[in-house]
Image (spheres, helix red, strand yellow):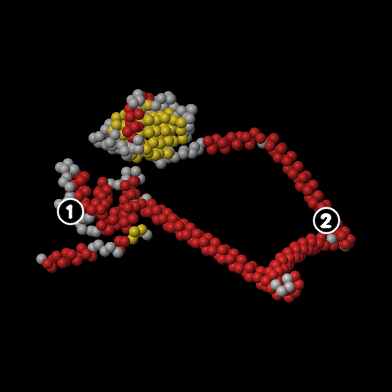
């Protein structure tokens, strides 16, 4: 028994090496797992549509990473009808004794396999992080360079001040040595037998002599600068003056300039004459072919009018779902519809001549519903919003990516119109329909789905609420449609 225990402990120790799982894709494993779990939680059911089995696997990895291996004694008791809880425990139990790091890595790899948008999201986060680090390093380097430059400037100022002071003292000492004997004789005559007064007078005379010398030196520098400026101006005048001292060269230069001027005038006259003749030709062509040109212009405009650019719709959500349901229910009751299981409701909203954009809002009770928007390129027969209900067996739309033919779509008109179309082959040809928003299931029981779309032209918007995938359950829909001037 001890041998079996030791052999079973050995693979357990080697099954979870902590060092290889420390990093993945340039991130610490725990940080990458947090990013992956946040991405899955925010986009599940919206940008990510996973199967039931794949969701069970991801939840099992999440439980293993947060709580460790499955333990029957610690597991909560399940109800008899709790099928989902039983499936989750079974998938958790299948993971065995893998470590939490391996479970995190399994969650990341499985999400990367099932969702193609996950890896670009992580790459964008990594680039943003690296860019932030580069900006911080660049900012620190710039701050360091600025501090070093400031220190160098201060040091240079101190050195310059020290040099100036040293030069001043050396100059003053040299002047004092030259005038000391002369000032000493003068001080002895002024204060005979008083060495202290003689020293004070010598010091005053030397200081005054230094200031007078510096003033004279400053005046000499100013005079030199003015003399140099005047000499430069005089040299510039002399460079322009030789043309007046040489008559032959001046005459030759004037003759060359006159020749060039005559050639230029002749060329200018020829150009004006050529332009004048060309204008006469263009006017004659315009008068002769004006009607043809106008027809060509109209034809081109008609060709461009055949192509209409449809802008994409804008869709967002907001959390005040209870307030929205209360407001819609408090109205006339037209905004609350019960959609039976297997049914599809089409709300026909004609464009308004005073509007330029349509807005819609909708939500449901407790369950999701499919939603999409089409646009029918036909002049509205009425300005009222109408609601049409059809079974899933009647939904046989032939849809392309950007175009929908309504010859097989029973939801593009009323039942009476369809019967008239079957009886009258000419009336059976209906207007084309463009897809604005494809039909997808929306989790509109947690938040209100809101959207808008700019009018592409005159026609009818078809708001499709699809419950054809539900076999047993009916849905209660709250919706509101309006336009912007």
SS class, disc 2: helix
* In this view, 156 is above or below 404: below
Q: Position of residue 328 (x, y in %)?
A: 35, 29
Q: Determine whether, in the image, residue 388 is placed left or right of residue 176.
A: left
Q: Can you tell which mark lies on residue 215?
A: none
Identify the residue at horizontal 75%, vertical 74% (top origin). 185
Q: Quadrant of the N terminus?
A: bottom left
Count the marks: 2
* In this view, 354 is above or below 260: above
The quarter holding residue 374 reads: top left
* In this view, 444 is above or below 44: above
Q: Position of residue 482 (x, y in %)?
A: 42, 30
Identify the residue at horizontal 26%, vertical 54% (top origin). 65
Q: Determine whether, in the image, residue 445 is placed left or right of residue 155.
A: left
Identify the residue at horizontal 32%, vertical 43% (top origin). 45
CA gap between label 2 and label 1 equals 107 Å
Q: Residues within 10 Å of mark 1 (few under 14, many from 20)?
A: few
Whether residue 164 is visible here, answered yes or no, is yes
Front residue of 114/330: it is: 330
Badge 1 is on which residue? 71
Query: In front of the other: label 2 or label 1?
Result: 1
Front residue of 77/261: it is: 77
Q: Residues within 10 Å of mark 2 (few under 14, many from 20)?
A: few
Q: Residue furthest right?
A: 247
Badge 2 is on which residue? 257
The quarter holding residue 9 reads: bottom left
Q: Position of residue 427 (x, y in %)?
A: 41, 27
* In this view, 40 is above or below 385: below
């Amino acid at each position: 028994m001890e041998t079996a225990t030791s052999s079973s402990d050995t693979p357990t120790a080697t099954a979870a090496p902590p060092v290889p799982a420390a990093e993945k894709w340039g991130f610490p494993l725990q940080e990458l797992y947090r990013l992956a779990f946040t991405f899955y939680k925010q986009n599940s059911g919206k940008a990510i549509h996973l199967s039931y089995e794949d969701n069970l696997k991801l939840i099992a990895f999440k439980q293993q990473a947060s709580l460790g291996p499955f333990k029957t004694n610690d597991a909560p008791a399940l109800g008899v009808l709790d099928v989902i809880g039983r499936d989750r425990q079974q998938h958790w139990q299948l993971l065995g004794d893998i470590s939490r790091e391996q479970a995190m890595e399994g969650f990341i790899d499985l999400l990367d396999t099932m969702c193609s948008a996950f890896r670009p999201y992580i790459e964008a986060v990594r680039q943003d992080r690296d860019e932030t680090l580069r900006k911080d390093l660049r900012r620190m380097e710039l701050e360091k360079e600025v501090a070093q430059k400031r220190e160098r400037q201060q040091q240079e100022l101190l050195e310059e001040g020290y040099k100036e002071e040293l030069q001043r003292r050396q100059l003053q000492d040299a002047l004092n040595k030259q005038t000391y004997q002369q000032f000493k004789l003068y001080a002895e005559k002024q204060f005979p037998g008083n060495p202290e007064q003689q020293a004070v007078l010598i010091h005053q005379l030397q200081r005054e002599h230094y200031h007078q010398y510096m003033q004279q030196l400053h005046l000499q520098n100013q005079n030199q600068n003015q003399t140099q400026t005047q000499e430069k101006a005089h040299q510039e005048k002399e460079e322009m003056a030789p043309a007046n001292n040489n008559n032959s060269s001046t005459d030759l230069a004037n003759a060359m300039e006159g020749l060039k001027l005559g050639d230029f005038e002749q060329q200018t006259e020829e150009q004006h004459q050529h332009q004048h003749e060309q204008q006469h030709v263009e006017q004659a062509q315009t008068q002769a072919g004006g009607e043809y040109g106008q027809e060509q212009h109209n034809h081109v405009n008609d060709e461009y009018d055949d192509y209409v650019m449809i802008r994409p719709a804008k869709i967002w959500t907001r959390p005040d779902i209870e307030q929205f349901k209360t407001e819609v229910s408090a109205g006339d009751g037209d905004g609350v519809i019960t959609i039976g299981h297997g049914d599809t409701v089409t709300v026909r909203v004609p464009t308004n001549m005073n509007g330029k954009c349509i807005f819609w809002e909708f939500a449901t009770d407790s369950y999701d519903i499919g939603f999409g928007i089409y646009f029918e390129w036909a002049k509205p027969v009425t300005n009222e919003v109408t609601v049409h209900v059809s079974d899933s067996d009647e939904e046989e739309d032939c849809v392309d990516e950007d175009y929908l033919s309504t010859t097989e779509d029973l939801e593009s008109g009323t039942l009476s119109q369809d019967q008239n179309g079957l009886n009258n082959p000419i009336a059976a040809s209906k207007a084309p329909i463009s897809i604005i928003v494809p039909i997808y299931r929306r989790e509109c029981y947690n938040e209100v789905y809101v959207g808008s779309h700019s009018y592409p032209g005159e026609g009818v918007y078809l708001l499709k609420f699809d419950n054809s995938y539900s076999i047993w359950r009916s849905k209660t829909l709250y919706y509101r449609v309006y336009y912007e001037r």
